[in-house]
Image (cartoon, grey):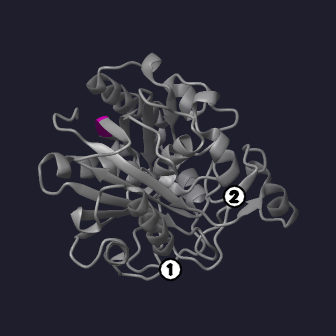
Amino acid sequence: MRFENDLYIASTASWLPDLVPMEEAIAAGLVDDEHRNLGYESIAVADGVAGPEMAVRAGRLALERAVGIERDEVGLVLHSSCGFQGHEMWPAAAYVANETVGRAAPGFDLQQRCNAGLGSLCLAAGYIDAGFTSAVLLTTGDNFAPPWVDRWNVQLNLVFADGGTALVLSGRKGFARVVSATLGADNSLERWNRGTTPFATAPGLEMPLRLRERGLQHAATPEAEGSWERIEAALMDTTRRALAEAQVSVEDISRVVTPLIHRGVWPENYDVLGFTEKQSTWDLGRLVGHIGAGDQFLGLEHLVKERAVGPGDLVLLVAAGAGFSLSAAVVEILDVPPW
């Protein structure tokens, strides 16, 4: 979608816990051989702070940074996460909304795994563009703690990190303009995270989560053939549409924000899209790890805080989540806020 009406990013923010050096985690026997050489130097690990609590901290900071936008202007809160939010059968988004913008703004939970954060921007953009509200608060928050999940080894090509992020989207003002945003999917790939075991009817029966084992189950089936090619095709299609609708090309993009994962011997996400590591945010990723749904909001904040972008620069945001779902957005930097 190319937006006919002006759409802005008023602010981004994050809350990250202390970093645990990878060498320390390896020495403690927490990291298997397969995950020791992914390029991470440290991982953000929270101690007793739940995902929604981190989201609230990031959300409050984002609202403070959104100069000229009042809390009561925010007419919707979308809270994204990858997993357990502190309580079962509980609307975390209602808590996040109440603790950030107050009792009246509707809050909705999105759980499209690592695509949820940037995907929520696409959904919120349509909500503002349709005139339902002038501002939306987007948050993410996860704690990948044991015994629920073994953050160090649970999935290929990444180590999960804890953190909360937030972004204020506005129809009135901001430091950046959203030029285009797109969503994509290949739902035939959902079984990579489901495996071949029957559906359960109660939570907590698999502790810790065995995502790699589910993937190996599916990999042994004929249905899995050609999966990487289908994922890459969906990623490229989603990104191409975002660029085409913004009427720009890869050469026009200054920086790209992709998931904070490192594939090692496989092509990196930024490689596949036609960018160099220097154009990516891997300098951030190697220090904090993959925080699930919030990598894109965190990455954009990082570029601003590091003064790595300036007025006129175009930034491409790209996300992918198990399922598989994807999203992409082209953002033009208008000015650099003094965060």
Q: Which residue does the numbered mark 2 point to in the structure image?
A: 43
Q: Is residue 112 left or right of residue 246?
A: right
Secondary structure beneath disc 2? strand
Quarter holding residue 291:
bottom right
Q: In the image, what residue type sits under mark 2?
A: Ile
Crowd around label 2: few <14 · some 14–19 · many ≥20 (10 Å): many
Secondary structure beneath disc 1? loop
x, y (%) of residue 284?
64, 45
Cα–Cα gap, marks 2 and 1: 26 Å
Give the mark toward the camera: 2 or 1. Answer: 2
Q: From which residue to which does the magenta span run?
A: 179-183
Q: Is residue 200 magenta?
A: no
The residue at the point 60 percent across, 25 percent down is 276
Q: Is residue 225 left or right of residue 106?
A: right
Q: Which residue does the numbered mark 1 point to in the structure image?
A: 204
User: Chief secondary structure of the magenta span?
Assistant: strand
* Nearer to me, 14 or 305: 305
Q: Is residue 305 visible?
A: yes
The residue at the point 51 percent across, 48 percent down is 338
